[in-house]
Image: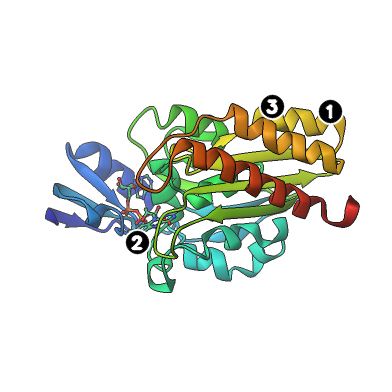
């Protein structure tokens, strides 16, 4: 259970940020779904629901998704449906149920860099940047490694619009559970990006396999080889959902399927 002493709901992100830095123990509340699963005494809860960062906006070059955008909105967005083979909607559609997906937010997920995140794995194969209110813009890849260097608010994520095809796959024991492993792949012309998440640690790119396909082409044999290379190189861990050896094998299979799907009938 959480207890909250003071509750504020700022009308814009600037007020939210000023409140966050002025209160010693201020805690941001996105959807609040994850926070409320723990135990916490919160001195000041800063609810972002009125801060006007609940948007999905298309500009000439990018798609911008506000930090307070829920997974439900990602799933139903006519803008996102047009890009990346609708992978972003697909990556979240199996997370628990509609009610939860209508609560949980992109900002709460990405800023927290959860290892189990399905969305982060998918975003990593796109040209994705995170926009932190104070620290500015950084690539998602860099943010996942370094995190936020100071107290900040994830204002939005910015995805470059391109003609990338993308595929997301995950393996879970049951619908309500976290994934045992998830993978995403994308192909822009002849360039591939491959990410693996829920290892169970944070998602990472499979650099060796990406290089291999980018240099040698994507024949059926090369796809098998790249899937094997990624599975052998990436570090996996053991938890109650599966052992690292099991994850390694699942990774090989999911990557092979995802890569074959992303190249479609070209092989
Ligand atoms: C029962 C349950 C099952 C789940 N299963 C899955 C699953 O299978 N796969 C999956 O990918 N995810 C799963 N999730 C996680 C979910 O997808 C979200 O990642 C998670 O709930 C965080 O989003 P939130 O909006 O609830 O964040 P909150 O609970 O509001 O906040 C989480 C943390 O992020 C901080 N925060 C919130 N918003 C911001 C912001 N804009 N900027 C900076 N910091 C911020 C908060 O201060 C807090 O520390 C599950 C969650 C629950 C509750």
Horizontal relation, residue 169 to residue 244: left or right: right
Circle 2 residue = 49
Marks 2 and 3, the one that precedes in the sequence: 2
Q: Is residue 206 above or below residue 86?
A: above
User: Marks 1 and 2: CB-CB under 8 Å?
Assistant: no
Residue depth check, mark 1 versus mark 2: number of the one nearer the observer: 1
First in residue order: circle 1 vs circle 3 = 3
Picture quarter containing residue 105? bottom left
Q: Position of residue 195 (x, y in %)?
A: 61, 40
Image quarter for residue 8?
A: bottom left
Q: Nearer the viewer, residue 12 or 253?
A: 253
Q: Secondary structure at mark 3?
A: helix
Q: Is residue 163 left or right of residue 175?
A: right
Name the residue tied to disc 3. Answer: 208
Q: Which of 97/145 is in front? A: 97
Neighbor class of circle 3 (other Cα within 10 Å; few <14, some 14-19, many 20+) is some
259 horizontally vs 148: left or right: right
Question: Which part of the image, by quadrant, shows the N terminus?
Answer: bottom left
Mark pair 1, 2: CA separation: 46 Å
């Amino acid at each position: 259970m959480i207890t909250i002493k003071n509750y504020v709901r700022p009308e814009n992100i600037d007020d939210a940020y000023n409140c966050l830095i002025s209160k010693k123990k201020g805690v941001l509340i996105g959807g609040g779904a994850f926070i409320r699963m723990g135990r916490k005494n919160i001195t000041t809860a800063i609810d972002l629901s009125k801060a006007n960062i609940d948007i999905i906006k298309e500009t000439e070059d990018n798609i911008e998704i506000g930090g307070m955008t829920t997974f439900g909105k990602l799933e139903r967005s006519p803008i996102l449906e047009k890009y990346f083979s609708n992978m972003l909607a697909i990556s979240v559609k199996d997370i628990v149920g509609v009610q939860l997906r209508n609560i949980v937010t992109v900002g709460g997920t990405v800023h927290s860099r959860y290892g189990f995140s399905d969305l982060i794995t998918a975003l990593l194969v796109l040209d994705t940047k995170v926009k932190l209110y104070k620290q500015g813009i950084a690539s998602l890849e860099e943010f996942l490694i370094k995190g936020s260097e100071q107290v900040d608010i994830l204002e939005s994520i910015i995805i470059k619009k391109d003609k990338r095809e993308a595929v997301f796959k995950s393996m879970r024991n049951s619908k309500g559970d976290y994934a045992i492993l998830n993978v995403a792949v994308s192909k822009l012309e002849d360039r591939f990006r491959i990410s693996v998440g829920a290892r169970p640690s944070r998602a990472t790119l499979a650099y060796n396999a990406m290089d291999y396909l980018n240099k040698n082409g994507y024949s059926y044999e090369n796809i098998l080889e790249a899937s094997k290379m990624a599975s052998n190189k990436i570090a996996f861990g053991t938890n109650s959902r599966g052992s690292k050896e099991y994850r390694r094998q699942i990774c090989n299979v999911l990557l092979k399927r995802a890569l074959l799907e992303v190249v479609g009938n070209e092989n």
